[in-house]
Amino acid sequence: MKKKIIAVTPKKMKKPLLKKISRINLEGQIRLLTRDLNVIKRQLKRGVSREKLSKEKFRGEVTQGVNREKLGADREKQGADRERLGADREKQGANREKLGAGRERLAEEQFRLQTDEIELKDGQLREGADREKLAEEQIHIRTKAMEATFDGIFIIDALKPDFPIIYANPSFYHLTGFTKNEVIGKNYFLLYGVVDNLHALEEIKQALLQGRSFQGELLNSKKNGEKFWSLLRITLVRDKNGTVTHYVGNKTDTTLMKQRNLEIEEQREELLHVTRVGKLAEFVSSLAHEISQPLTAILSYAQAAQRMLKDREPQLQEVLQYIINDDQRAAEVIRRLRYLLKKSKPTFELLDINTLIKDTITLMMPHITAKNKVIKFESGSNLPSIQGDRIQLQQVLLNLISNSLEAMESSNDSRELVISTCLKDAGTIMVKVKDSGCGIPEENKLKLFGHFFTSKPDGLGMGLSISRSIVEAHGGRLEAENNPDRGATFYFTVPVYMKKGQ
Amino acid sequence: MNTSIIYIVDDDASICKATSLLLRSNGFIVEPFVQASDFLAFKHLKMPACLLLDIRLPNINGFALQDIMAQQGIIIPIIFMTGYGDIPMSVKAMKAGAVDFLPKPFTEKKLIDAITLALSKSKVQNKKQAEVAKIKQRVDTLSPRELEVFHFVAQGMMNKNIASKRGTSLQTIKVHRGRVMQKMQAKTVTELIHLAQKAGITSATV
C-alpha cells in the first residue's frame, strides 16, 4: 500500500503546480500587453506634441505648404503609428490566442491528470476489493479451521480490565459444556470457579504478568460438574508496539490420554503384583520343600523309635508322640501358608504370541526408556496361535526383559534389546530375548534356573526358576546361552496350538 | 512281609535314613538310594517290591525315572513323595501309573497303607510276569517252523489257508500245529491264542 502511495504522489502534486505555472504565465502576458499599451499612448501623445510644434513653426516662419507637407508626413506617421497600434493589437490578440491555447493545454493536462488519478484510484479500489475478498477467504478458512479442531480455542481481550473472553470456538463449548452466552464477555477464571484451580490460576497469572506464555495440565470441571483433564496453553498476542492486546488460549482434552496411561500403569502394576505374588508363592513353596524334608525325617525317626520301643518305656513313648504332634503342627503351618499363596489356576486360552509380546513391550516401555535402552521386536510372520495363560507368559517375558535391562545397566554403549519370534518347527514357536549386556559367567550357567540363585544383590533368585516352571507348564523349554559377540540370549519354546484330531 | 523289598530314592540322605529306619522297624527290607542312577544300576531281586520316589531330584527327576523304568521293563509299583504337595503334580503322577502320592511329611500309617497297597499290586504283577516268563520258556522250545505256524494260528488263520500260504500240504500243517499245542501245553485253540496274547505274540511278525 505504502509503495503505491509513494508512486502516486508526484502525479498528485502536478496539478497545483501547473495551475501555478499557468497563472504566472498569464499574469506575465497581461503585464506585457499593458506595457505595450502604455508605449502606444506615449507615442500618440508625442505625435500630438509634434503637431502643435509644427503648427507654431508654420505660423511662425514657413509656408502653409511646408506645413501641409509636414502635416501630411505627420499624418502619415500617425497612420503608421495607427498601423503599429493595429499590429500591436493584433499581436495582443495573438497573445490572447496563445494564452487561450495554453489554457486549453493546461486544462487538457489537468484532465489527463485527473483521469489518471481516477484510474489509479479505481485500480486501488479494485485492488482493495480483491484484497478484501482474499482476506475474507483467509478469515473464512481460518475460522473453519478453528471450528474444525478438537482443541478448545478462546481469545481474551487483554486491554479490557476484566479480561473478557471475546471468542471461543465450538470445541471450547463442547469441551466445557458452557454455551456461548455463558462464555463471551466473561472472565476466563470466573468461568470455572477459582477454587478448583487456585494453584494453577496463580501460576497462569504469574506467567501472564511477566509477559510469558503459559502451558500446563489442569483438572477442570465441566458445567455439569464432570471433571476433565486438559492441557492449557495461553499465548500472548502483541501489537506492533509490543503491547499485549489479546491472550489466545488453547485447551486440549487429555482425559482419554491420561486414562490410557493410567490403564497401562495399572496393568503393569497388576502384572508386577502377580509377579510378586508368584515369586512369594514360589518362594514359600521352595521354603516349604526345604523345611518339609527335615520334618519328614524327624517324623520318621520319631515313629521308628516308637515302633522300636513298642510296649516299653511309656514315658518315652509319650515324649516321642509330642515330637510327632509338633512335627505335624509345623507341617500344617506350612501347608496353610502354601494354600494361602496358592498360584491362581492358569487359564489357558488361544493367544497370538506376537500380540502378547507387543502388549508386554508396551507395558515395559516406560522402564526401557527410563533406562535409556532401545527395544527392537522382530516378529515372525504368519505364526500360528498358541494355547497358554496370558498373564503367566507375560510374566516370563517381563522377567526376561527385566533381566536383560539389568544386564545392560552398567554399560552405556550396550543399549539394544532384541526380541524375536519364529517358527522353530511346524509344531513349535520360539521366542528369543537377546541383550548386549554382560552375559552369563561360566560358573553360573548351571545354577541359573535354580531356586534362590541370584547374581543381583537384592534378588530373590526366583525369577528365572518361576519362568522356567511356567514355560514347562506350557509344554516348552526355557534356555539361555551367551552370544558370540556380547551379552546373552534367553529363548523359550511354546507348542503351537493343535485342533483336536490334528 | 519279610519277603518284600522297599526301594527309596530321595536326594535327602536324612530322609533316606529316617524312612529306612521306620520301614525296617516295621519288618521290611529296605534299599535306599540318593540318586536315580544308583537305583537303576541296582540288580533287582525277584520279590514283591515297591519304590518310594521323590519327585524333585537332581539330574533324573522322579517322572523321568518312571519313564526309564517303563522303557527298561522294570515293573515296580511307585509311591511318589514330594515336599511340594500340589494337586496337578499328584494327578500327573497318578495318571502315569503311580500307586500313591505322599505329601511330605507323612505319617507312618499313611506310609504303611501306601506300601501295603503297592506290594499287593507288585505281587499280582510278579505273578503275571512269572506266567509270561513261563509261556516264553515254552515258546523258546518251538522249532522255527512251529513258531511260524503258531503265529499264523494266533492270527486266527485256518489250516488250509496256512497250507496254501506256506505251499505245503494240509497234513504237514496239521502235524506242526499238533506239536505247537503240545509244546505250549494248550488243550484248545482258544487257550493257545490266550497264551499267544500273554506272551505278546498277536501281531504278525513273519
Image (spheres, rainbow, N blue to C red):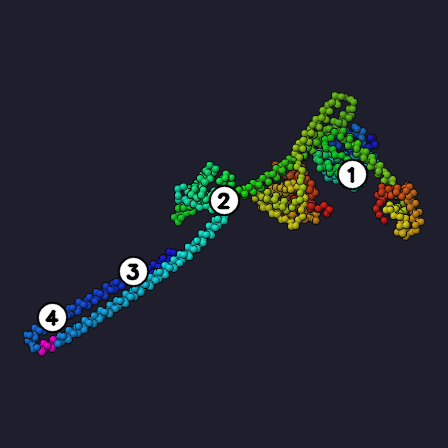
Circle 3 sits in a helix, a strand or a loop, which is it? helix
Q: Which mark is residue A49?
A: 4
State the residue at coordinates (11%, 72%).
Answer: A50
State the residue at coordinates (85%, 49%).
Answer: B206
Is residue A66 found inside the magenta-colored segment of the image? yes
| Numbered range of the magenta stretch | A65-71
Is residue B15 found inside the magenta-colored segment of the image? no
CA neighbours of label 1 inside 10 A, class few (<14), some (14 to 19), many (20+) = some
x, y percentage for residue A416? 60, 46
Between tags 4 and 2, which lies in front?
2
**Amino acid type, label 4:** Ser
State the residue at coordinates (51%, 47%).
Answer: A150
Which circle's residue, 4 or 2, is located before the other in the chain? 4
> Is the residue under label 3 in contact with that under label 4 (CB below 8 Å)?
no
Magenta region's main secondary structure?
A: helix
Residue corresponding to mark 1 = B40
